[in-house]
């Protein structure tokens, strides 16, 4: 972990272990506020709506509070990195990632200002209501939102993120396996791949390094072979989950799919913390080869943000100069309803819920009709 990551990690840990309900906590002094403003790397973070997220953790998702805090405490080191491991830059957006040392939780920075305000001011209330109604929803469980309570030089200069979300890690349990088994776990960040991606499609993508293109979109070359009940359960939950995203005008979200080899012998793989649900705990494939897990992630890009509008204009201009040879919309510039429809179609296509090809085709046509109707 580099020195910048250590500073960020320490700020996160201080916020997690600081209790806002402690009566002994005093308001910061004027000097403390001045010093906080001139911080460039180790910012003062606080828990946003701490009581709301605690209610989600304890009452809705049944996450034990002591075990939750212990996930951040375990393996604490003298250098201040605590129970966090830096995962570097795992996304195309440039977000920084950390994981707790027991592998149960991930911490992701929200690097774009419109993502921060969208989740905090527009999506959080419907997200909370939806999770309270459907505790086994496949929207990733966000257990904390950490942010700077006042402006700081580090956020103004862009040296340090001002917002971080703490969320479940459905790779939980991987670290408990022997190292040869850990390497067999596969992850896929899946989005509809029929959209126009300038980094991939313009001039054959030759102007962009392979390291960038590899992070644009994953391809799952196989099929998720499960029972019809498991497939219908997955699709029906995603229909519910993506509905609130469409209503909030969100798009560009992903299905995070995990699979690892099925082994009926030995100790079972530990499940992610909190209330169990089949697609979090693991669905065994029909051929007994794989165990699948899935959640819906990265639902912070809003269609009506200024950046999205600007990119929409750029893509429209590109298509105009193509003289009718347009490449269509990007995943971040299409409409929320169109993205939702294509996303659900993608899920329907990669998941097989029947054995015979005729049954698969009939079921696929029925689900696509239902999806199209629901997204209209």
Image (cartoon, rainbow, N blue to C red):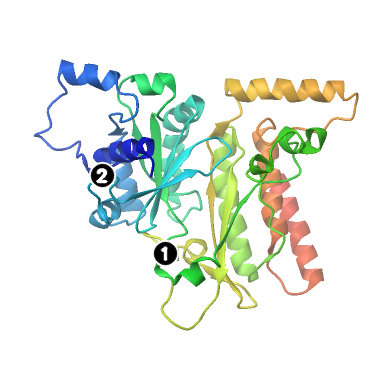
The CA distance from mark 1 to mark 2 is 23 Å
> Is 265 situated above or below 318?
below
> Is 213 situated above or below 162?
below
| Mark 2 lies on residue | 79
Residue 3 in the image: x percent, y percent? 35, 37
Residue for point 45% across, 65% down: 174
Badge 1 crowding class, 10 Å Cα cut-off, few under 14, some 14 to 19, many 20 or more, is some
Q: Nearer the viewer, residue 50 or 31?
A: 31
Q: Which quadrant, please, contains the C terminus?
A: top right
| Mark 1 lies on residue | 175
Q: Nearer the viewer, residue 272 or 249?
A: 272
Badge 2 crowding class, 10 Å Cα cut-off, few under 14, some 14 to 19, many 20 or more, is few
Q: Give the number of callouts.
A: 2
Say whether residue 99 is left or right of residue 306.
Answer: left
Q: Nearer the viewer, residue 164 or 226?
A: 164
Residue 350 in the image: x percent, y percent? 70, 59
Q: Nearer the viewer, residue 362 or 150?
A: 150
Q: Is residue 374 visible?
A: no
Residue for point 46% across, 38% down: 126
């Amino acid at each position: 972990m580099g020195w910048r990551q250590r500073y960020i990690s320490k700020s996160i840990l201080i916020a997690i272990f600081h209790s806002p309900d402690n009566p002994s906590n005093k308001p910061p002094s004027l000097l403390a506020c001045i010093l906080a403003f001139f911080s460039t790397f180790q910012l003062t973070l606080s828990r946003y709506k701490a009581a709301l997220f605690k209610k989600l953790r304890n009452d809705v998702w049944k996450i034990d509070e002591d075990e939750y805090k212990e996930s951040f405490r375990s393996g604490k080191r003298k250098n201040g990195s605590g129970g966090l491991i830096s995962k570097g830059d795992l996304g195309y957006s440039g977000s920084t990632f950390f994981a707790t040392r027991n592998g149960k939780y991930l911490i992701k920075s929200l690097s774009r200002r419109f993502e921060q305000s969208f989740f905090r001011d527009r999506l959080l209330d419907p997200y909370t209501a939806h999770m309270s109604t459907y505790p086994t929803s496949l929207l990733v469980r966000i257990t904390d939102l950490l942010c700077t309570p006042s402006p700081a030089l580090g956020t103004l200069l862009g040296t340090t993120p001002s917002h971080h979300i703490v969320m479940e890690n459905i790779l939980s349990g991987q670290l408990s396996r022997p190292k040869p088994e850990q390497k067999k776990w596969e992850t896929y960040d899946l989005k509809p791949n029929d959209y126009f991606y300038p980094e991939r499609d313009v001039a054959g993508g030759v102007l962009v390094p392979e390291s960038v293109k590899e992070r644009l979109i994953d391809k799952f070359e196989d099929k998720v072979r499960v029972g019809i009940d498991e497939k219908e359960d997955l699709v029906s939950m995603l229909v519910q989950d993506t509905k609130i995203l469409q209503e909030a005008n969100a798009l560009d979200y992903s299905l995070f799919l995990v699979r690892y080899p099925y082994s009926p012998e030995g100790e079972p793989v530990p499940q992610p913390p909190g209330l169990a649900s089949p697609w979090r705990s693991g669905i065994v494939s029909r051929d007994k080869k794989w165990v699948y897990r899935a959640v819906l992630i990265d639902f912070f890009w809003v269609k009506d943000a200024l950046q999205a509008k600007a990119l929409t204009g750029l893509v429209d201009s590109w298509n105009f100069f193509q003289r009718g040879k347009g490449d269509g919309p990007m995943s971040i510039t299409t409409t929320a309803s169109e993205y939702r429809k294509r996303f659900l179609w993608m899920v329907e296509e990669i998941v097989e819920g029947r054995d015979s090809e005729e049954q698969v085709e009939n079921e696929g046509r029925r689900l696509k009709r239902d999806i199209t109707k629901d997204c209209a």
